[in-house]
Image: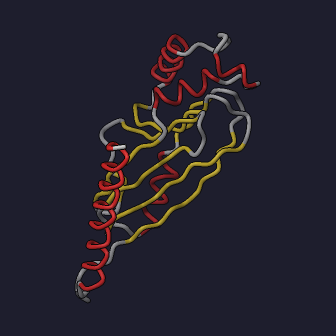
Amino acid sequence: SQAERNQARNLEDALDRVRALVAAALREPRSRKASRPTAGARERRIETKKRREFIRITDQVSEIVRKSGVSEGFVLVSAMHITAAVYVNDWEDGLIHDFQVWLEKLAPAGLDYRHHQTGEDNADAHLKRTLMGHQVMLPITNGKLDLGPWEQVFYAEFDGQRRKRVIVKVMGE
């Protein structure tokens, strides 16, 4: 069909552009004086005691950034599970409670979700994770995690009581 031919042509054009970029990168000499990019990923394990739990992880992320040696760049913090979130906000018990109430109104536990027909019972956890987001990208300035006043990094668990992973990937110079 015409649509399939157009799709094949677009893919071939994209592949040609990638080939040209790779070829140009291979030809380009590297200056010895240029700063060298640094990247590194660290995995952190989080073991939650409750089904739903909010855990502040700012200090762990800051320590990984400090040890990375990156002066200017970004750090990606990502929950590696489909029922957990990573977000940035204020570290205040009332606000954390408000998040829990708000999420429960939007994605209540105990409803007859279609997902439960698969034998699972955690559809609300998937929905809550989608609302909160699964990862954040944060700036690194002068070798430190650069958060605004009152900002903290949190891991939010919506189907816990087991061990889960968070990836912290530092990128920059």
The image quadrant where one finds the C terminus is bottom left
Rendered residue at 36%/54% (across/down): 8
Is 171 left, or right, of 141 in this rendering? right
Image position of 154 with respect to 63: above or below: above
Q: Residue furthest right?
A: 119
Residue 131 point in image, percent of width and height: 46, 26
Work out which quarter of the rendered image holds the N terminus and state it: top left
From the viewer's perspective, tell me whether residue 139 is left or right of residue 60: left
In this image, 10 relative to 117: left or right?
A: left
Residue 167 in the image, given as x and y percentages of width and height: 54, 53
Colour convention of the picture: secondary structure
Q: Is residue 71 above or below residue 2?
A: below
Which of these two is toward me, 112 or 53? 112
- Quarter of the image for residue 149 reads top left
Closer to us: 82 or 50: 82
> Which residue is rendered at x = 45% and y = 21% of the image?
95
Q: Judge left or right: residue 71 versus residue 118.
A: left
Considering depth in this image, is 4 or 65 the residue closer to the camera? 4
**Count of numbered marks:** 0
